[in-house]
Image: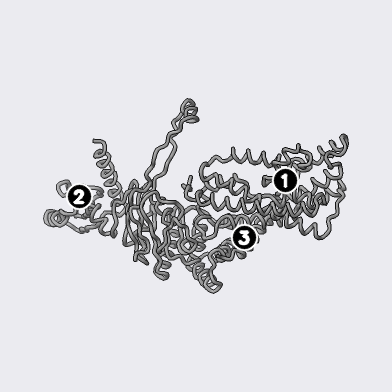
Amino acid sequence: MRNLLPIYGIEARMSMQRQAQYRGAAFISVLGFLIEPIVYLIVWRTVAQQAGSINGYGVEEFTSYYIVWTLVRVFNLALAPGAWDWWVRSGRISNDLLHPIDPYHRNLAGMAGAKVVWIAVWVPVAAFLVLLFRPEFSPNLLEASTFLVAAWAGYVVRFNVLWVLGLVSFWTTRAEALVEVVVAMELLLSGRLVPMAVMPPWVQAISAWMPFKWTFEFPIELLIGQLSAAEIWRGLGMQLLWMAISGSAIVLVWKRAIRKFTAVGT
Amino acid sequence: MATVDVDNLSKTFKVPVREEGFVNSMKALFHREYRQVEAVKEVSFSLDAGEVVGFLGPNGAGKTTTLKMLSGLLFPTGGRAEVIGFQPSDRDPDFLTRVALIMGNRNSLMWDLPVADSLDVRKVMYSIPDGDYRLRRERFTELLDVADLLTKPVRNLSLGERMKVEILAALLPAPRVLFLDEPTLGLDLSMQKRIRGFVSEYAAEEGATILLTSHYMADVTALCERVIVIHQGRLLFDGDLAELSERFGGIKTITVSVTGDLPDLGPYGTLTEHTAGKGVLAVPRTDVAAVASRLLADLDVLDLSIEDPPIEDVIERTFASGDDVERESDEATTE
């Protein structure tokens, strides 16, 4: 088995270089990602101010939740399935398939490298949000370290799920419809739109067995101190489980996708 | 053992039939029709180690599809291919390390970063030892004259410059088999010449097997002794260039200069060009000696030369003969 560490190292470094070259674009992209949680934050703070605490979430909790959301969002950003559509249509995928390294590894590493620059851009924005909304949570070193593990694991799970979705492009050059459905499911079942505690119990039950929650809500709640030790272990276990499931799905679908590849538009 | 061995290789694409108009679009919502397009039909050939072979055919003949099957990009729907002992469709990493496909007008380098960064990525991806990497990079950089391009972002390079660094990057792992698909497409003459020179030198020094497609016959005549001609997915010819002229040329050209005005040359052959005192005749190959003797005997000849027709004309005739074959086979199947 080939040692992939040097590949991960150089791809991450190149991606950082690319992002650093377009600092302005990186800054605007991060700002773009942050508009969504800021809207949720303002709406739910207003709701909590008027209605009081909702299933354990009051003004303070919502504030902390959505500010950490911004960091988790930067971590779990993964390759949009639409990129595949373009890769297949433009023929870029042909170039990638000619190399002896699976494009999965190159892209997983590349996106990871880009995050280092995005996080650097995120810091001043987060500082501004903290000064503005004054969230109250103070994780200890162990919680912060566990958060980092959970955030990277969440990235891998989300990357894998979107990668499998992207592979649909090998069967059709119009995979957007399916992607829309999954994005809507993620919005509702991940804690992206609203903490799952605010959702009805049956929605919470479904979300616990889907991958989405483990890429969004789990790392957020871990850092803001909403989880017990048992819940943290369970969450890390679920992330591992979904890494294994999504990883196996990639191996299975990839073999068929490659056979299906007909070099559309190349 | 042949380096590239292709036996009855076929590729059929299933493509949807889309008729124009609103009604037909609505019909397609419920019932979609497909047709089979045979891009490559039972093609067989083999290449020995170190051979440089031209792969010719008009647009849509199946050249690129064949190259993509041989480099592991496309799965064949029939037949068998073996390249340096591997089945390309298995996409074995060892196979992908030792085979390269370079497509003209295609960028595989990192668009926003300097060329040197892309080369460094290749080094890691192909596990090229430090010493080999340094040596090859220096040598290829010199041969292609691209030293000043290595620090420029790829997006700032011209088409010709990009092609040169594409070739440099593709050859860094020292592939044993090289598939070149229109490597000089859109380049000016000097750039074409430099790339031809480099490919020729690489083939000679590394003993690499090269299969080259190009619409520029200068590429083929400069690099290849042998050509394979494919038309509408079928193999039409496999042999050396001289034999191609022999078989499909059919004619030779006689250029004759005379003192005074040019007389009527109609009785000697087909006059294709003429100026005062000089004419070019197309003459059937078998009649050349007799016609030349008659010209020398009948006219006051200043100069006479006999040549093969330009290779472009031969290729055109070859493709035309392919159309005839296809028509005959269609008629045979519809009777």
The picture places residue B153, in percent across and down from the top left corner, at 60, 58
The picture places residue A62, in percent across and down from the top left corner, at 82, 43
Chain of the residue where label 1 is placed in the rendered structure: A
Label 1 – label 2 distance at C-alpha: 81 Å
Determine which residue is flagged by label 3.
A11
Callout 1 secondary element: helix
Viewer-proximal residue among B7 and B165:
B7
Amino acid beneath label 1: Phe
The picture places residue A251, in percent across and down from the top left corner, at 55, 53
- The answer to whether dots 2 and 3 both sit on one chain is no
Chain of the residue where label 2 is placed in the rendered structure: B
Residue B12 visible somewhere in the drawing: yes
Residue B183 visible somewhere in the drawing: no
Query: Which dot, 2 or 3, sits closer to the camera?
Result: 3
Amino acid beneath label 3: Glu
Determine which residue is flagged by label 1.
A33
In the displayed structure image, the side of residue B33 where residue B156 appears, left or right: right
Q: Residue at x 26, y 59 (%)?
A: B242
**Whether residue A233 is situated above or below residue B207 in the rendered picture:** above
N-terminal-most mark, 3 or 1: 3
The picture places residue A22, in percent across and down from the top left corner, at 68, 53
Viewer-proximal residue among B274 and B206:
B206
Viewer-proximal residue among A253 and A128:
A253
Determine which residue is flagged by label 2.
B262
Chain of the residue where label 3 is placed in the rendered structure: A
Residue at the top extreme, as displayed = B23
Badge 3 vs badge 1, beta-carbon distance below 8 Å: no
Amino acid beneath label 2: Leu
